[in-house]
Structure formats: C-alpha cells, structure tokens
Image: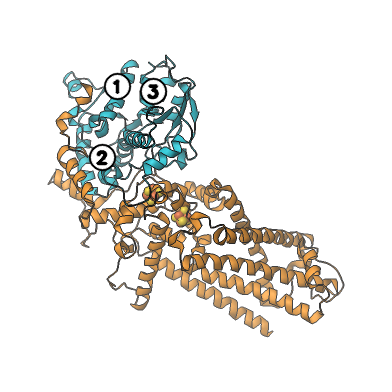
Chain colours: A cyan, B orange
C-alpha cells in the first residue's frame, strides 16, 4: 500500500491477508492462490504488508473487548489513512470483523470475502476456468460459521464449485445448519474442554460420510481443523482438503 | 344465580392473579439494561408473523412441527369457544350463540372438536417422545427434576382439558337427543363433528341427572383448566405461548456475526489513542464490563430467558454439546431464568430492591467451563424457533471473566499477549507479515 501511495495512486482493492494467511504455512498457499487469481484477472490490488495487524477477532470472541478495540482502532487509523474503500479478505473471521464490527469504531469499508469476489470474477467473465481437473470430482463444501450463519453467504462458494464442473455433494448438516469445525470462538488457540470427542473429528466424519474426493473450505482455520480431522481418519491420501481459491488457482 | 356469582369471582380472581404475576415478570425483565429494539417496525412485524405466528423455523424439523401445529392451532381456535363460555358464565345462559349463529356455530364447534382430536394425538405423541422414545434432546441432564415435570404437567393438563371439552359436548349431545337439553325443548342433535358420535357412544343410556352433572363437570372443568393454565404460565416454560410473539418482534435484525460494541470500552480506548479526545461523561455509576449476574444483561436477554420453551433445538445442534462438553445453550437460558426468578423473589421481600444475596449467575448457575467451551458458531441462535440468542449471554459473561476477573484460560491469555505484542495471535513478528510472498 505504501508503494502505491508513493506513486500517488490508490488501488481499487485492498487484500486483507489476515494472520493465518500471513504466518500459517498451509494458509500461505491459499494466500498465494488468491493473489494468483487476482493477478490473472488483472485486478489492481494492494496489501498492507507489515502494517497489517490482527483484526482482533479472536480477542473479541474470547471476551477481550479492550484488546479488540485497540486492534480495531489501530487498523482503522491505517486503513483510513490510505483511504481504503474496498477490502477482500481470505478469512471469514477478518471478513466478519471488518464488515460488521469496524463501522461502529469509524471504519467503513465495502468488505467482500474471497469466495464472493472470485465468484463475481467468474460470472463477469474476468477469469476463465481452464483445465477442468476437477470435472466430475465429488466435492463437498464445509460452510464456515462466520461466512454462513454469521453473514448469510452460502451460495457464492457453491457456485464456484459448480462452475468447476465438479459434482457438489452436500453434507447432512449444510448451509444454515452447518456444523462448526471447532476453531471458532477462540477455540483455535486453546485446548478444548473435557468431552467425548473433538468437534473437528465430528465435522470431518460428517464430511467423509459424503464420500468426497475433496472437502472444500473457505477459511484457513476450517482448513486446519478439517485437515487434522482427515488425518485422524487416515484418509489424507484419498481425500484432499482445499480452499475454494486453490481449486480455481489450479485451473487457470 | 349462585353459579353466576361463583363464576364471576372465580374468573376475575384468575385474571387478577395472572395480571399480578405478569407484572412481576415484567418488572424482573426490566431490571435488565436497555437496548434499542424498536427500529424497523415493519420488518419486525413481518418477522413476527413469519416466525412466531407462522412457526417458520419450527418446520425445519417437520414431524414435531406438525404435532406442535395441532396444539398451537387448537389452542388458538379453542379461545373462540371461551368467549361463549364466559358469556354463558356471566349471564347464566346455555350455549348462548347456538341459536343465533346456527350452522356457523355447528361449523366452529366441529372445527374445534377436530382440532382437539388432533391436539390429543399430538399430546400423546409428545408424551411418548419425552417418556418412551426418549428423544435425546428431550432427556438431557438439564431437564432432570422440575423441567421434566413441568413439560409432563402441561401435556397431561392438555389431555385433561380435551377430555373436559368432550364430556361437555358429548353429554350435551345425549341430553339434546333425549329432549332434555337447555338449548331446546325438542329432541335433536347439535351435529358436532366428533361429539355427535362420541357422545352417544360413551354417555348414551345415562339418566338425565347424571348427564347434567357430567355436562357441568365438563363445563366447569374447562373453565378451571383454562384459568389454571393461564396462572401456571408465568411459572413454566409454557409461558412461550405468549412471550414468543414479543420475543420474536424484538429479535436482533443485524448480521449474527456482529457482536455488540462496548461503548464504555470505546471511550477508554479513544482516550488511550488520543488523550484529548472528547468522550461523553459517564453518569457516575461504576461500570461493570460484561455480565456477572442477570442485572448486567439486557432486558431482551432476560425476555429471551422467560421465552425459552426448553425444546433443546439449540443444544442438539451445538458443536460443543454434541461432542460431550458441559456447555448447553438451553441450560444457559434456563439458568438465566432461574437466577432471574430468584432475584425477583429477593426483590419481593425487600420492597422492590435487590439485596445482595452473595450469589450470581456466573459460578452459582453457569460455570466458566461451560462458557469457555463455546465456539461462537451461532448454531443455537439459528436453530431457536423463537429467536433466542444464548450466544450473546455467553459473550457477555466471557467479557466479565476476561475484563473484570482476568480469569481467561492461560492459553487465551498468551494469545492476547501475542496480539498485543506481535499483532497476531501467534508468536510471529509483525515484520514477517509479507513472508508469504517470497
Ligand atoms: S454458539 Fe456456542 S453455545 Fe451456541 S451452538 Fe455454537 S458453540 Fe454451542
Ligand atoms: S433457546 Fe430456543 S432452541 Fe434453545 S431450548 Fe430455548 S426455545 Fe429451544
């Protein structure tokens, strides 16, 4: 972003990479896929780079409103400084926080999740899917809570899977009835309370019941959780866990 | 004459007692903090029509929804008959509207009778789902004791009420057939859909006096059950039949992912960023961040607790609960209500003000273990047929634990530290944020 500013330009879009997308090795691949798609469609975009900081989502869900607002105000100062208007995120948690919780603190942006954005690119003909390596493959989509129930986005990621000519199969609990992967509410950062099962194992079991070749996700945290779940069932050879962005990026 | 007097005293007494209890509930709910839910009234009315009246969310589980619909419609339609019962009760007449309404009367009562039979079937099915089939969400541990009894009471009461209706109509039918009815001197039939057949089958051949007694037992039984029901409501999960409507009307209309902003925190954070910032002065009362007890919640959250029907749809879809954690969103609502009732009783004996009883919703009712098990996934909010929001209570209580008690689990504290120091929940340096691009 700073580079654009130096040139006196403002890019149309800011890509909010997010903490997982910046630091988690698995999620970095998703980040690169999103970038590949944006470049392919000639979308002019910028990232904040080292000026980006956690949106504060995990702090807010854990009840630390102070820390959340500190993070939010810091980020808003930077975003407003660059006069950012439109943000694409690679993570439903960043998406939800930026879109719903920043306005009350003075951060008003048009925020869009990467699956929505990619779907728009496809329907506007700005990217063409070639290769068709997922044609006929059985794909099931796991709804991230903070994209689905939290923000009622259910169809964009599914439409992409249909555009890929894959065979979309639904889990019994899907869309508004989808089951959490187990990461939300800051659970990602702590051991689960005592129980008789891990949530990610439960959800992965439901996904595997559809006999998929691929479990598609739209959130780096879901990705980690479901990947671990697939490993739990020793299915990592036959079932791949991939972000919707990766599916597209592999077919450009 | 004496029966008119008894009826009037009985009925007014029941109505007054109910009003007193409702006002208590209202007072209890209003100890909650204010929250604005008056905007967008047209959208709210629509939502109420769809979700409360139209039972929209119920039909995501079609079988119980259909059974419930029988009871629901029967309940509403039976109130029409109640108009006549009251009219007869205060005037001493018998089936006041029968002659003036004619065929329409037969139609209405027949309709009520058919619905009563459906409601009867529904009630039996509900009783067996709870007690024989033991549907998992209806036998969870938080229902042990009173809640289970409460549910069965209501269902048995329902059956009793239906029996009274058929005693009344059935005996009256036989009376009419024998020319003993108060409705008409001649012999005839009311022609009601069910009791015209059921009546003679059960009561045929009985003496005139026995029939009159049975008919009166049915009539008085009906009135008694209705008043008993009404006055039982404020003590029971059955209160939902009334509160569901306002509760849905005052629903959260915003995105479920949007958690409330704590303005008190905003002011402090603003001052930290800019010491000269102008923030609205506080009103002097010491503020509490988050919720420790029911008075820290909003009136809507308290209304939620009174509205909860304890159906367990929330709990049966909760990821934490189905994987064996102690968290149950239904229990969150039940605990909130129980504590609120306790606080209300405390206010009753202390001239309307609450005297500290050394207890609180946190710890004495809801444990930190429950609260920390939540995934904030909104499944409970989505599932609730009357738009209750257990998650918002969980979050308020987490806020209290974190900001007032600093009692978050150690791993979360290190996550907080990481965000504060590195701008990420993990121990990575902010300077490495662009490494993915290498
Ligand atoms: S938000 Fe929390 S309580 Fe509600 S269903 Fe999800 S995990 Fe359970
Ligand atoms: S909160 Fe809603 S879904 Fe849960 S038990 Fe109460 S009424 Fe049922």
Residue carrying label 2: A106
Which x, y percent locates residue B294? 33, 63
Which residue lies most toward the front here? A234
Q: Chain of mark 3?
A: A
Q: Quadrant of the C terminus of chain A?
A: top left
Tell which residue pokes out farthest to the left in this image: B275
The residue marked by circle 1 belongs to what chain? A
Quarter of the view holding residue B173: bottom right
Q: Which mark is residue A247?
A: 3
Q: Is residue A72 left or right of residue A245?
A: left
- Residue A84 visible? The answer is no
Sequence-first disc among 1 and 3: 1
Query: Residue at point 29% right, 73% down?
Result: B355
Q: Nearer the viewer, residue B223 or B359?
A: B359
| Circle nearer the viewer, 2 or 3 | 3
Distance between mark 1 and mark 3 Cα atoms: 13 Å
Residue A35 numbered mark, or none: 1
Above/below status of B135 relative to B234:
above
* Residue A16 location (% of width, % of height): 27, 30
Q: Residue furthest bottom?
A: B2
Of the numbered discs 2 and 3, the one sitting upstream in the chain is 2
Residue pictured at 38% horizontal, 58% vertical: B332
Q: Are marks 2 and 3 in contact (CB under 8 Å)?
A: no
Query: Measured from the top left, where is residue B27 in percent x and y?
Result: 40, 68
Taking the image as drawn, is residue B182 in sight? yes
Residue B429's tag is none
* Residue B227: % across, % down: 58, 72
């Amino acid at each position: 972003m700073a580079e654009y500013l130096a040139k006196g330009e403002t890019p149309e879009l800011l890509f909010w990479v997010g903490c997982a997308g910046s630091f988690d090795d698995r999620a970095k691949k998703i980040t690169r896929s999103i970038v590949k798609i944006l470049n392919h469609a000639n979308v002019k975009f910028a990232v904040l780079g080292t000026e980006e900081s956690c949106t504060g989502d995990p702090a807010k869900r854990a009840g630390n409103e102070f820390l959340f607002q500190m993070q939010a105000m810091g980020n808003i100062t930077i975003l407003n400084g660059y006069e950012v208007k439109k943000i694409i995120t690679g993570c439903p948690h960043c998406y939800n926080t930026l879109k719903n919780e920043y306005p009350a603190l003075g951060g008003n942006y048009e925020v869009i999740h990467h699956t929505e954005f990619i779907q728009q690119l496809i329907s506007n003909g700005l990217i063409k899917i070639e290769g068709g390596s997922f044609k006929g493959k059985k794909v099931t989509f796991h709804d991230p809570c903070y994209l689905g129930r939290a923000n009622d986005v259910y169809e964009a990621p599914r439409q992409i899977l249909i555009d890929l000519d894959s065979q979309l199969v639904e889990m019994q609990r899907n869309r508004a009835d989808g089951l959490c992967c187990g990461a939300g509410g800051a659970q990602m950062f702590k051991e689960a309370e005592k129980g008789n099962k891990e949530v990610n194992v439960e959800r992965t079991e439901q996904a595997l019941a559809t006999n998929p070749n691929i479990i598609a996700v739209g959130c780096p945290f879901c990705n980690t959780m479901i990947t671990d779940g697939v490993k739990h069932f020793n299915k990592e050879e036959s079932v791949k866990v991939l972000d919707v962005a990766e599916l597209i990026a592999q077919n450009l | 004459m004496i029966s008119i007097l008894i009826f009037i005293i009985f009925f007014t007494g029941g109505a007054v007692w109910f009003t007193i209890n409702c006002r208590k509930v209202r007072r209890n709910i209003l100890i909650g903090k204010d929250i604005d839910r008056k905007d967008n009234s047209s959208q709210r009315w629509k939502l109420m029509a769809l979700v409360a009246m139209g039972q929209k969310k119920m039909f995501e589980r079609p079988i119980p929804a259909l059974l419930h619909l029988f009871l629901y419609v029967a309940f509403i339609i039976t109130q029409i008959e109640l108009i006549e019962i009251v009219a007869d009760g205060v005037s001493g007449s018998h089936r006041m509207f029968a002659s003036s309404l004619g065929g329409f009367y037969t139609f209405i009562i027949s309709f009520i009778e058919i619905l009563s039979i459906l409601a009867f079937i529904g009630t039996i099915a509900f009783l067996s789902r709870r007690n024989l089939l033991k549907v998992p969400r209806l036998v969870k541990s938080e229902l042990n004791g009173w809640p289970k009894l409460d549910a069965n009471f209501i269902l048995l009461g329902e059956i009793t009420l239906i029996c009274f209706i058929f005693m009344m109509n059935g005996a009256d039918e036989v009376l009419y057939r024998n020319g003993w009815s108060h409705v008409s001197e001649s012999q005839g039939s009311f022609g009601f859909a069910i009791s015209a057949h059921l009546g003679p089958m059960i009561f045929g051949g009985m003496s005139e006096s026995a029939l009159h007694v049975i008919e009166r037992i049915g009539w008085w039984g009906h009135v008694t059950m209705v008043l008993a029901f009404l006055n039982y409501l404020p003590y029971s999960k059955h209160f939902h039949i009334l509160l569901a409507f306002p509760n849905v009307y005052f629903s959260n209309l915003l995105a479920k992912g949007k958690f409330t902003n704590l303005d008190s925190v905003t002011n402090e954070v603003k001052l930290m960023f800019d010491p000269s910032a102008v923030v609205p002065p506080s009103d002097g009362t010491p503020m509490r961040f988050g919720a420790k007890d029911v008075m820290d919640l909003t009136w809507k959250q308290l209304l939620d607790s009174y509205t909860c029907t304890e159906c367990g749809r929330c709990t049966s879809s909760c990821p934490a609960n189905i994987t064996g954690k102690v968290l149950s969103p239904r229990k969150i609502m039940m605990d909130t209500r129980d504590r609120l009732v306790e606080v209300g009783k405390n206010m009753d004996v202390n001239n309307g003000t609450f005297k500290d009883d050394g207890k609180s919703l946190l710890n004495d009712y809801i444990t930190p273990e429950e609260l920390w098990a939540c995934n904030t996934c909104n499944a409970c909010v989505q599932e609730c047929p009357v738009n209750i929001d257990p998650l918002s209570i969980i979050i308020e209580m987490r806020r209290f634990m974190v900001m007032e008690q600093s009692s978050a689990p150690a791993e979360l504290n290190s996550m907080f530290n990481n965000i504060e120091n590195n701008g990420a929940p993990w121990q990575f340096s902010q300077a490495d944020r662009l490494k993915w691009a290498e």
